[in-house]
Amino acid sequence: MSSAIAVVLISLGALVRFLPHPDNAVAIGALAIYAGARLPKAWAMIVPVAALFISDAAKVNGTAFADSLFATASLMRYAIVAGIALASSFGPRKVSLLVRGLQGAGAALIFFLASNFLVWAFPWGLPGEPGVYPQTLAGLADCYVQGLPFFRNSMIAEVLGVSVLFLADELAVALAGRSIKFADDSISS
């Protein structure tokens, strides 16, 4: 059952990145939180990374495929969402929707802080070119300030996304009329 749920979540996560949306308004962190709370740890980390990787691969033309998918920026995004999923897998399986919403806000904050810090610390322009932000505290502050409009979109998407996923989960369990076991210790279904 876990592998089937993982495939559905990966497909959903990849698909929503192709729907029209404001910048950074895709709830991959919510997907990571849900996967962490409902799937075995191995699947929990695979789901959001696979959703990002598949949608990234579909957006790239053949010549730039490896460069863009395995660029520092992409690898950092994959690591951040895998970390969110892993952290979520250690929490309690059943918590209130308010707590899930706070987790979604936390995922948006973690992604904002980590990704903007990495943009500042490791500029991934052409070799030998300076980064957009100077390697000073003022440059770091400017990087965060410039990212605030994207953070707002991410925050809204993650809180709504986690709410939708867990409400759908509760509805599915209620419709099934019984408790559904989602997580186990293996990757197989």
Image: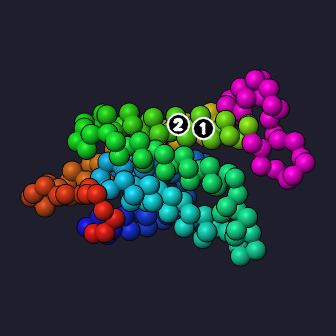
Does the magenta portion include 130? yes
Residue 110 has which mark?
2
Q: Is residue 156 left or right of residue 182?
A: right
Callout 1 touching callout 2 (CB < 8 Å): yes
The front one of 46 and 119 is: 46
Image quarter where the C terminus lies is bottom left
Q: Quadrant of the N terminus?
A: bottom left
Q: Amino acid at mark 1?
A: Ala
In this figure, which residue is indicated by the disc labeled 1? 114
Which portion, as a residue range, is magenta? 122-146
Is residue 108 part of the magenta span, yes or no?
no
Q: Position of residue 143 (x, y in %)?
A: 72, 33
Using the numbered discs, state the Cα–Cα distance from disc 1 to disc 2 in whole angstroms: 6 Å
Q: Is residue 161 visible?
A: no
Which residue shows up at 67% across the image and 61% down it? 70
Q: Position of residue 145 (x, y in %)?
A: 68, 29
Question: Looking at the image, which residue sits at the far front?
Answer: 185
